[in-house]
Image (tube, coloured by chain):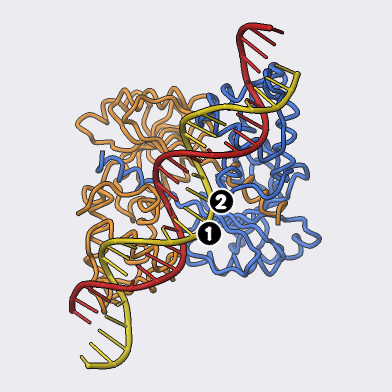
Chain colours: A orange, B blue, C yellow, D red
Amino acid sequence: VSGPLPPAAVSRLPRYLRFLEGVAPSVSVVSSEEIAEGSGVSAVQVRKDLSHLGAAGTRGVGYDATSLAKRIGKALGLEDRLGVAIVGAGNLGSALANYQGFEARGFRMVAVYDVDAKRIGPLPNGLDVRHIDRLAPDATGGQISIGIIATPSEAAQFVASLMVEAGIRSILNFAPTELRVPAGVAVRRVDLATELQILSYHLAAG
Amino acid sequence: VSGPLPPAAVSRLPRYLRFLEGVAPSVSVVSSEEIAEGSGVSAVQVRKDLSHLGAAGTRGVGYDATSLAKRIGKALGLEDRLGVAIVGAGNLGSALANYQGFEARGFRMVAVYDVDAKRIGPLPNGLDVRHIDRLAPDATGGQISIGIIATPSEAAQFVASLMVEAGIRSILNFAPTELRVPAGVAVRRVDLATELQILSYHLAAG
DNA sequence: TAGATTGTTAATCGATTAACAATC
DNA sequence: TAGATTGTTAATCGATTAACAATC
């Protein structure tokens, strides 16, 4: 009974998953109320979202934490440890490369890519910085599923096109730029200054 | 006629603003169609969002880029160059401290704060890393409007409470943690691994 | 059986889109 | 006046919440 999930549900599933991974295996059964509490969402919302995965709980009891986590992971396609490449080895790119959370939450970091020869070589954590020319060969056979753009704005569109060319179909863009990509390529954008501007509004408007 | 803006409109205004700042002053008048094109939103959506600011365009002509940018900036409360503090001088915190975009888009970086004495001192770009104990004194008189949490997850709640204590009422949280804050404090969260997991779903579901 | 909690169906709410009137 | 484009009102759509039936 699991058709396509509503976008809003998809964006909340990772939060539930994170909560579940935090409690299991010390706790075996959790209620929607507890999941809600732990992820800042209402309990009804949690149940509604989880119901899209097909019945996953036991009435009168709750959800088995471990099997629910597996189920969410499966729905999100996290079983395969998708390969992730970062383009741009500047401050942000390096910080992302050092971030433990990607590996911890189901991804496989492939390498960082840059145009600048001076930046090429291994990072302190062992991850390689390689020349951008190696992106396409490294991506063959679907070895890179997700590309992260951490370059200056001016380079973002060029890098995006390179990624698409290399067969990458999901892009996370940290440059504050509208990317043009063909249909079928998913782009998400994290715009840091925009986040501050939204907070600014809340201060101004009360 | 400008009551409170719908949240969805608030989150799009920064994108319009960025586009406008990119074209003005070389272009003086833009249509909703052009703004839409430049910010990846439909033209009707643009007009609807802008109408919340009160009539800002000229029928048959379009919007004056400069005055519209001012108007959006005013609505978002960007006129005052709000002070921003980063807590956590690790990889991510340092990358954020070096990021040009915050100053470029209307904010004033105050300093970075950390518990670790070894990290204290000026960064390459001139911004200070100070001991966390200095956060509260530095924040007096509203000198710090927005706090950015770039610490490990374990420290996030502690830092958030410290910020609230210091009178900071807007928090941008990069730690994948649910923060407990009193009513009246706005929290936005940027969860990097969650972004990848959402992209993963798109790959899995097609 | 009684208590607890899920999962579904219906109601409400808000956001997006469509249609069109206003006006430069 | 005719063409262009805004801004508003109404219609549609989707997401959230409420109510409740199902069932452990």
Q: Position of residue B122 (x, y in %)?
A: 68, 48
Which quadrant is the N terminus of chain A positioned in? bottom left
Q: Which residue is mark 2?
A: B93
Q: Is residue B74 left or right of residue B199?
A: right
**How far apart are the two marked residues, 1 and 2, measured between alpha carbons?**
8 Å
| Amino acid identity at mark 2 | Gly
Is B71 left, or right, of B117 in this rendering? Answer: right
Read off the chain for label 1.
B
**Is residue A158 shown to the viewer in this render?**
yes
| Residue B48, position as x, y percentages in the image | 60, 36
Which residue sits at x=35%, y=45%? Answer: A126
Q: Which mark is residue B151?
A: 1
Q: Is residue B57 above or below residue A104?
A: above
Q: Position of residue B44 (x, y in %)?
A: 55, 30
Residue drawn at x 58%, y 54% is B172
Quadrant where the C terminus of chain A is found in the figure: bottom right
> What secondary structure is marked by label 2?
helix
